[in-house]
Image (tube, grey):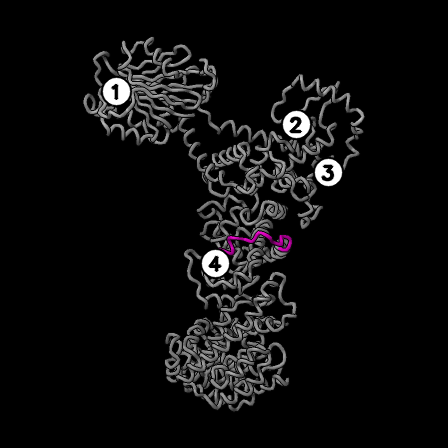
Amino acid sequence: MSKEMVKEEAPSSSGVVSEENRPFGSLRSVQWRINLGILPSSSSSSSSIDDLRRVTADSRRRYAGLRRRLLVDPHVPKDGGSSSPDLVMDNPLSQNPDSTWGRFFRNAELEKMVDQDLSRLYPEHGSYFQTPGCQGMLRRILLLWCLGHPECGYRQGMHELLAPLLYVLHVDVERLSEVRKLYEDHFIDKFDGLSFEENDVTYNFDFKKFLDSMEDEIGSHSNSKKVKSLDELDPEIQTIVLLSDAYGAEGELGIVLSEKFMEHDAYCMFDALMSGAHGAVAMADFFSPSPAAESHSSLPPIIEASAALYHLLSIVDSSLHSHLVELGVEPQYFALRWLRVLFGREFSLQDLLVVWDEIFTADNSQLHRDSEDDESSSFKILNSHRGALISAVAVSMILYLRSSLLATENATSCLQRLLNFPENINLKKIIVKAKSLQILALDSNVSSLSSTFGGAYNCSKSAVVRGHSLSSDSVSPKTPLSLVPDSYWEEKWRVLHKEEELRQNSVGKQTPSGKKRWSEKVKLSLSRTESDPSPARAENCKKGHRSSIRRSLLEDLSQQLGLEEDAEKGGCLGASNSEDDHCIEVLVEGDNCTNKESICAAEERCESGSGTVVSDENSSIFSEPASPGSGTNDHENDTEKSSVASNLFIDENDDHQQSNLEDSPLPVSLPPEDVPLNSLHENESSGKMVSAMKERRHLSGRFQWFWKFGRNNVGEETSDKGGTNEAAKSPNHDCKRNTADSLTAGASRNSSSTSKGDAVDQNVMGTLKNIGQSMLEHIQVIESVFQQDRGQVGSLDNFSKNILVGKGQVTAMTALKELRKISNLLSEM
Amino acid sequence: MVLVLALGDLHIPHRAADLPPKFKSMLVPGKIQHIICTGNLCIKEVQDYLKSLCPDLHITRGEYDEETRCPETKTLTIGQFKLGLCHGHQVIPWGDLDSLAMLQRQLDVDILVTGHTHQFTAYKHEGGVVINPGSATGAYSSITYDVNPSFVLMDIDGLRVVVYVYELIDGEVKVDKIDFKKTTATTHSAH
């Protein structure tokens, strides 16, 4: 055994694990055996060293018996005494499957497969792992386990799980030999100058050596250490001695750290790890291609576990999650390797041992669910602390790569980064983050969203449309805004769509109300400071998950707008308050309205309304959406630039919205939009007017997207502004029918629309929500870019900050471009 | 655990059409590591078939072989054993143990495999083994009556070789085995 492997850093590197949980902290193999359930833990029963030894001895006996049974040596006759074995059956060429030779050949096949993997195991630590002794042990262990579990067979990766287990055993044995050297007296029987030491498996009593040792004995009396009694030793050394005493319980078979029985111990650990030891997470499940018996989804366990990963990620960082989903990076592409080998291929060996320390310390017992209805949607992997920690570690690793992942634009490079985890990592950070996520994972499993899960991961890898992902965002009650959304592309898209909406809804219904709605919505969504957008959305949500969320958002918007009626910044808001109410009602009214336009219009209105909100973040957020809208107008480009660049969009909006109102060069898609436009005129806040204009300039593309939400809106509140609503709705309705390509088409549709107020409302609400959300994100990014001092960025986002700066500028430019685009479209119409 | 198949004297197509079906069903590729053939196959197709069973094929030339490029004798080392191969028609009297022993000493091998008599024999002689696998097809022989199809499979494991003999008697495959242990390793020159 090579000694250099032992010079690892002391267990102090694993300082993250609390000491009280690890009585055998320095002896990893013993600690892990306790954690995996092979040895009784010291806390459960007041088990002494003797108990440990007894259990160890039993498990070793079991393995030896198994080995004798299953490892076939065809030369040895089946039963020792039989005179003539039936040669017709037992010859090497026998076709009889029962013959020993048949079994021998089958084992040989399995061995060949195992050898293929073993020869490539840990080449960087080849000095240990590639030695024939080690390879032989690994081969036998894997062979016996696979023979004992024929339903699993051998899968690539099992050897990677086994190797570190054997390694920690080896390390501990090395430690033992060190201790033995120092404290010989406790291990060796030394009488009359004869020492009967056991070296390796057999000891040869060599007379020559004996004579030499006699001389040494005489000569070294002066050098001999003072013999200490057992109790005087360090507790750690004492433990080691007691564990390895040849006279303890079960004699030599019970020596817990024994080189002779490394194979047996490794097999027990491997078996416990694979079978999960009656816990929730059994590694063997990850290797099976078929769904588990009691799984609720019809997916293989590894796919389900990968889905759990993404589910957790979506809760923690929805923008990164949606980014990955949009690129088509299915979780199992990388999670398969991560989970099957428990991150063995991602970390260096020493780091891996630290990670496994953590994972094994976590309890693996199955957590019982209280409510039955959650059973259908819970993830099996998250059913235990250990499983939750495993998922949390995986998510924490993904978050570690956040910035580089968000920077990539195709799935291949994303996967490349995920599969080539960097070498020099701050492991402690990852583990600490993982622990915090573990709690979240356990909680999330209780309230897991089956809809999200099903929609995203059911059977075939359905392409997740952006709209879909966004919708899921709107559905999730807790969109975490703690992390600065770095979804650069998503925001870009959203801004673009927003502008489209605004254009198409230019003459929308109640522009003012829409504005108000928008401002509220945006305000709420913006609540990056305080208010949580989810409540806003939640409040909006009255019927149906989507529509309700949207509605709540709108309502919140209106509420907020109402609250700020008097505020300076909300001056415009105040003006639009009444309109907002209208708008909100309109929005709420919208039920199953397929009229995207209405939604768009509503959203635009909100946008404009939001644009009017000034001063606080919310207002800034509002202004930001407004600014894109304003950008649609040619003359607004300048202002838009500045608005994008700064948080104070309102001023410009105010300036431009007025002009926009007057302008309406954009094709008025909906004649009824004139109504909101008029209302806009009435509205003193220029911002609102702008939003109104924006509503007009609603791109059909936008419509379609929003129509999706609109459809889900089931709310059918009568709208006071029935007329305007309907007007708005009808255009939306029409718009919805068209594909989102031609603005003019949308415009015409808008004009032809009649009484579909509800649909319009729905659409409006939906679009408002979406616009609000996108505006929120957009604003957040920009804000983060320009407010780098704010410590909103989490620890893991530090590296994304730099990118944010660049991205913020880029985002600004992007928004600007989009606004220009919109304005061009409008000018065409 | 090296399996070596020894056979010969098939005389295909002159005296026999093919191996007996029961033998053919037993000979599947993948199990056998080496094939040594005493000769008289006689045509190339048989050689190709044997090669399909195992890529490591050694043949010596028999008097009816149409492949003229094979050597008269061959020696090879498998594990701890040295094997010698010869068709046997060169050693007269045909099938005589002492003459074959002379050849064995000449080739300096532990195991000598020869054929030509179409009859299975296996002698332990002077620290070595002299094996005649017989005729795998049971082809007619002018010196042997009642030729039974037979061949030999050797399982070489360290210093021990187990010789399995497969004979087709009355339509049934009969298996017998002979154990042989070598006293010293191949590195030592003394037998």
Disc 4 chain ID? A
Give residue A413's mark: 4
Kindly identify the residue that appears in the image at 58 percent across and 40 percent down. A165
The span picked out in magenta is A413-429
Label 4 vs label 3: CA separation?
A: 48 Å
Name the side, left or right, on which A333 lies relative to A28. left
First in sequence: mark 4 vs mark 3? 3
Q: Amino acid at mark 4?
A: Ser
- Residue at image x 68%, y 44%? A10
- Mark 3 belongs to which amino acid? Glu
Instruction: State the image coordinates of residue A635 (x, y, percent, origin top left).
Output: 49, 86
B172 and B143: which is toward the camera: B143
Q: Is residue B71 above or below residue A709?
A: above
**Disc number placed over residue A57 in the picture, else none:** none
Gap in Å between the C-alphas at discs 3 and 1?
76 Å
Instruction: Give how far apart the Cα atoms at labels 2 and 4 are.
Output: 56 Å
Inspect the magenta stretch and tell me whether residue A424 lies in it.
yes
| Mark 2 neighbour class, 10 Å CA radius: few under 14, some 14 to 19, many 20 or more | some
**For the residue marked with disc 2, what is the amino acid?**
Glu
Identify the chain of the residue marked 2, using the numbered disc in the image. A
Mark 2 and mark 1: Cα distance apart in space? 67 Å
Subunit bearing disc 1: B
Please give the residue where the numbered disc 2 appears in the rendered image. A250
Q: Nearer the viewer, mark 4 or mark 3?
A: 4
